[in-house]
Image: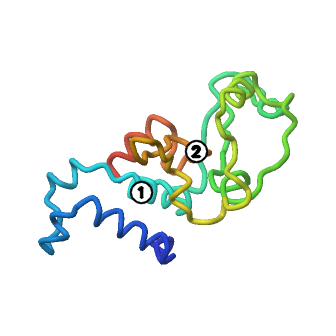
Amino acid sequence: MKFLADHQAQTKLRHALEAAFPTAVAAARDPAIQEITGTNIPYLDATLEETLRCAVTAPAVDRVAVVDTELLGHWVPKGTVVTCFVTGPSMMSSGFDIDETWRSPTSQAAWKKGQVRAWDPADMGVFRPDRWIVHEKQGASLVPRPGPSWPLGSVLVGAMARGWCI
């Protein structure tokens, strides 16, 4: 929770919660479970995502190569354990320049479709929940993946764990 010690983020979250539960605030009571589960609070979701991004819930994720492959020009035989550090370069600090020709065709295609490979270097080390929010005419909503983030592991396991944790 040290991230919420930033009074601006904490104040903004408090205001978002108060705006989401005006009846409970007016009655000076906690919101009922029906109010909580039936209310969409994008800034709360963004704060949780940003906390998971910055908190280093797991410093690394291991994967086993299921086929012979190549990663950024390095041969990786089937069965090799590959460790991905989820808080290293491109996550909390500037990444390395990597020649596009070293990347796989699927990586290059994802980049062309707009998938973000790294957070903005100007503020990637800063706790900023707003990076997860998009403002549209109909209101604010959570951006599904504005940058690389694997705080709970793989896509499938992470999605299940995220639901249980949050």
- Expressed as whole percent of the image width and height from the top left, the position of residue 65 reads 65, 30
> Label 1, on which residue?
43
**Residue type indicated by callout 1:** Tyr
- The residue tagged with tag 2: helix, strand or loop? loop
The image quarter containing residue 79 is top right
In the figure, is residue 25 to the left or right of 165? left
- Expressed as whole percent of the image width and height from the top left, the position of residue 137 reads 44, 42
- The residue tagged with tag 1: helix, strand or loop? helix
**Residue 62 position (above or below residue 77):** below
Sequence-earlier tag: 1 or 2: 1
**Residue 40 position (above or below residue 125):** above
Q: Within 10 Å of the Cα at label 1, are there few (<14), some (14-19), or many (20+) other Cα atoms?
A: many
**Residue type indicated by callout 2:** Pro
User: Residue at horizontal 38%, vertical 58%?
Assistant: 44
> Label 2, on which residue?
146
User: Residue at horizontal 14%, vertical 51%?
Assistant: 34
**Residue 155 position (above or below residue 40):** above
